[in-house]
Image (cartoon, rainbow, N blue to C red):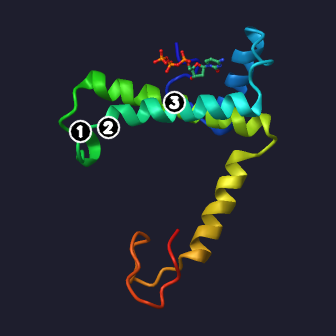
Amino acid sequence: MSGVSEGEEVTLKLLMKKMEDFAKERDWEQYHSPRNLLLALVGEVGELSEIFQWKGEVPKGLGDWKEEEKVHLGEELSDVLLYLVRLSDICGVDLGQAALRKIRLNAIKYPVNGTSNGNTTTTSTTTSQQ
Ligand SMILES: Nc1ccn([C@H]2C[C@H](O)[C@@H](COP(=O)(O)OP(=O)(O)OP(=O)(O)O)O2)c(=O)n1
């Protein structure tokens, strides 16, 4: 059903190709414009947010969640990922390479110094956290 055999690596490239095929087979490429995909992505982020809405803080690992809630979470996370991958492809952005570059930039912007967790400004000389 998944189209990927057990143990096979899931890559951004594979997801990109599957989304491309999905749209082609349905003649939906006309609808997969950058703006439409962005709006669809934001809509799915909203659906993802609804799962956490009003719950208060939840434990890491979601140990006390029902199995069906976790399955639903996986579905909404996937919708966000799939639209993001498709949007990147349609915009001609290599998402994997862009993400690796961004991680390198993050490391330069936030050097390891043991005083900041990236969420708070611990000293008046620490650069602003945005
Ligand atoms: N024009 C479209 C419509 C859907 N999809 C794909 C990408 C998403 O993974 C999923 C989104 O489908 P739905 O719009 O039906 O959204 P949900 O699956 O979240 O359903 P619902 O909103 O009813 O919960 O289908 C797509 O690629 N292009």
What residue is shown at x 78% (from left), y 19% (from top)? 29
Residue 55 vertical position relative to residue 30 in the rendered view, above or below: below
Callout 3: 10 Å neighbours few (<14), some, many (20+)? many
Please, what is the three-letter code of the amino acid marked with disc 3?
Glu
The answer to whether mark 3 and mark 1 are in CB contact below 8 A is no
Q: Quadrant of ligand 1?
A: top right
Q: Residue 13 got which mark?
A: none
What residue is pinned by disc 2? 52
Mark 3 or mark 1: whose residue is earlier in sequence: 3
**Residue type marked 1:** Lys
Residue drawn at x 42%, y 33% is: 48
* Residue linked to disc 3: 44
**Quadrant position of residue 61:** top left
Answer with mark 2 or mark 3, whichever residue precedes in sequence: 3
**Where residue 86 sits: x, y (%)?**
69, 32
Q: Nearer the viewer, residue 24 or 119?
A: 119
The CA distance from mark 1 to mark 2 is: 6 Å
Residue at image location 50% in from the left, 73% down from the top: 129
